[in-house]
Image (cartoon, rainbow, N blue to C red):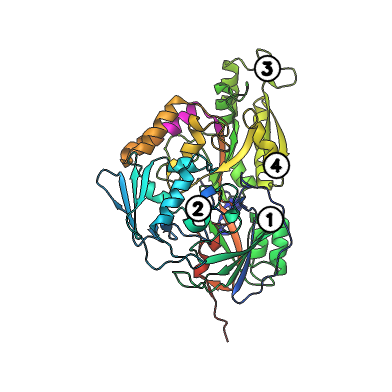
């Protein structure tokens, strides 16, 4: 990040960060929560909830599920380590075979034994064309999966997919329960059974998810015996409930976090920050006569003042975004940064025949340079980004009308209307880019929302996905990022840091590098099963 203003530096010192974006999969409302009981209980405030708790439908696919385990998991530094497997996989010389040895003696929370057949069932169920899992393309490399006895699983790949091991943090479901139900409509999605450190005891939609520790957990029963995730969409309400003692921790925006984390308050609290791959972007639908014009796209891409958004909207808690890959990632392509250049934007539009009309809005062949931009209702951060984008676009002669709505309202409009969207994953660049940009997924739910269609990008994404050579992959992703400069089907605005305020009563609290977070798997509670109560001083 470039030099900050004094205010931005202060915000960073405070570890200021933002509430995670409203997930494409949900739009919950806040509700009344149980009071924090202290001792061996913890209540945390999150902004969103999932539609399902079934791994077969996408829950926990990036790890950190409290109910389930994957074959592997991540440590605090996002390095892979064994979970249900006893070690990292053995990989064949050609990169096409991954062999996992499994832990013995692991049981599901209903007492049934875990074995290789559950792993095979989970992956085959997700890959089944009848399963409504929008993320199944993430497992496209799998040609087959088989059990060799109870304690060994072998995956065979179609091509040497370099980050495949990262995909095996996916939670494992029990065949004896989930396999006897309809994958899409069975009650396993709301009454899950897993091998994880916690058991779900209740789920009041839009209000809270309640858990209790699993006494038979193979990793040892957690010290936090009761764990509640309170779904509170509104920032101010979340802060109020933390201040009143109803919550032990919460995700908060910078100004509220600064106040609640300040020393001298009614209760000692800790402010924790997490760096993220979480970005905010504006989709530029290919099937709109204005946003589908490459000149308009290029002009908008340099008309936006990303640095001002970081300083003013995020109070320094983030960095400018020029694509899905943050500038401090080794996968970022140096030289693809775009400086704020309003005069340059105007020249691009002039040269392309978009001339200012009487009202200042540009016109070409009778078409006004105008389009709507949707953001999710109640999401202050997305609203602020949308308004700032519209203001910058207006200076270039492009009229952007901001609209708020639920995802139910927005999704049918995504083919032609722009959306203030979010995404990002730190595990591998394939996770960031393939579903976002490949034309084959255009119009597939929330994949490639703008229906971006660039043959050079398609070829590079496939080459990067199918190569096991890091140098080849880096060159391919360099091509993708350079193509986004030439034809930006999305205007990336900022990468957002996340900030959490936690009562200072627990030991073992840390954060990881986080994805575009949906509330349950990220935050200081990513490892709540390892927390210990602080010893009171006498």
In the rendered structure, the answer to whether residue 150 lies left or right of residue 398 reads left
Residue 414 vertical position relative to residue 362 in the rendered view, above or below: below
Q: Is residue 519 visible?
A: no
Q: Are marks 3 and 2 in contact (CB under 8 Å)?
A: no
At numbered mark 4, what does the secondary structure look like: helix, strand or loop? loop
Residue at the spot of label 2: 179
Screen quadrant of the C terminus: bottom right
**How many angstroms separate mark 1 from mark 2 (CA)?**
25 Å
* Residue situated in front as seen by the camera: 459 or 397: 459
Residue at screen point 75% across, 21% down: 359
Residue at the spot of label 4: 406
The mark closer to the camera, 4 or 3, is 4
* Residue situated in front as seen by the camera: 509 or 14: 509
Tell which residue pokes out farthest to the bottom in this image: 538
The part of the chain drawn in magenta is 478-490
Residue at screen point 50% across, 26% down: 453
How crowded pointer 4 is (Cα within 10 Å; few <14, some 14-19, many 20+) is rated as some
How crowded pointer 3 is (Cα within 10 Å; few <14, some 14-19, many 20+) is rated as few
Residue at the spot of label 1: 205
Marks 1 and 3, the one that precedes in the sequence:
1
Marks 4 and 3, the one that precedes in the sequence:
3
The mark closer to the camera, 2 or 4, is 2
57 falls in the magenta region? no
At numbered mark 1, what does the secondary structure look like: helix, strand or loop? loop
Marks 4 and 1, the one that precedes in the sequence:
1
Overall secondary structure of the magenta section: helix
């Amino acid at each position: 990040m470039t030099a900050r203003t004094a205010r931005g530096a202060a915000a960073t010192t405070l570890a200021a960060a933002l509430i995670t974006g409203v997930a494409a999969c949900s739009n919950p409302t806040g509700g009344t929560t149980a009071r924090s009981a202290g001792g061996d209980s913890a209540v945390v405030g999150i902004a969103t909830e999932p539609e399902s708790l079934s791994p077969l439908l996408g829950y926990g696919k990036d790890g950190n599920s409290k109910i389930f385990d994957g074959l592997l998991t991540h440590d605090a530094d996002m390095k892979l380590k064994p979970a249900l497997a006893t070690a990292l996989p053995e990989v064949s010389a050609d990169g096409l075979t991954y062999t996992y040895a499994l832990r013995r003696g692991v049981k599901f929370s209903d007492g049934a034994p875990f074995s290789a057949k559950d792993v095979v069932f989970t992956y085959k169920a997700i890959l089944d064309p009848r399963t409504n899992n929008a993320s199944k393309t993430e497992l496209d490399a799998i040609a087959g999966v088989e059990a060799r006895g109870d304690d060994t699983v072998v995956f065979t790949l179609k091509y040497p997919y370099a980050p495949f091991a990262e995909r095996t943090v996916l939670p494992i479901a029990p065949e004896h329960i989930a396999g006897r139900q309809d994958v899409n409509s069975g009650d396993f999605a709301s009454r899950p059974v897993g091998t994880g450190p916690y058991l779900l005891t209740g789920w009041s939609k839009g209000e809270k998810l309640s858990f209790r520790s699993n006494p038979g957990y193979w990793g040892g029963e957690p010290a936090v015996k009761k764990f509640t995730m309170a779904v509170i969409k509104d920032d101010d309400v979340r802060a109020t409930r933390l201040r009143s003692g109803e919550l032990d921790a919460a995700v908060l925006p910078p100004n509220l976090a600064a106040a609640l984390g300040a020393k001298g308050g009614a209760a000692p609290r800790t402010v924790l920050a997490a760096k993220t791959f979480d970005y905010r972007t504006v989709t530029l639908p290919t099937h709109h006569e204005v946003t589908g014009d490459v000149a308009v796209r290029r002009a908008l891409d340099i008309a936006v003042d990303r640095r001002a958004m970081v300083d003013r909207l995020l109070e320094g808690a983030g960095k400018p975004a020029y694509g899905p890959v943050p500038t401090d990632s080794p996968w970022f392509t140096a030289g693809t940064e775009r400086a704020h250049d309003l005069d340059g934007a105007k020249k691009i539009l002039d040269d392309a025949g978009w001339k200012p009309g009487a009202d200042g809005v540009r016109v070409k062949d009778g078409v006004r340079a105008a389009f709507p931009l949707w953001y999710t209702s109640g999401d202050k951060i997305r609203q602020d980004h949308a308004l700032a984008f519209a203001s910058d676009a207006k200076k270039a002669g492009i009229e952007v009308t901001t609209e708020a709505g639920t995802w139910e309202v927005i999704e049918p409009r995504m083919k032609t209307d722009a959306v203030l969207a979010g995404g990002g994953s730190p595990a591998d660049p394939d996770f960031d880019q393939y579903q976002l940009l490949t034309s084959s997924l255009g119009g597939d739910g929330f994949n490639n929302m703008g229906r971006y269609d660039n043959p050079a990008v398609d070829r590079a994404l496939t080459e990067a996905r199918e190569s096991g050579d890091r140098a080849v992959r880096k060159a391919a992703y360099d091509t993708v990022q350079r193509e986004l400069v030439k034809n930006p089907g999305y205007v990336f605005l900022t990468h957002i840091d996340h900030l959490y305020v936690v009562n200072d009563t627990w030991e073992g609290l840390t954060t990881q590098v986080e994805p575009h977070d949906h509330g349950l798997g990220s935050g200081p509670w990513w490892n709540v099963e390892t927390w210990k109560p602080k010893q009171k001083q006498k």
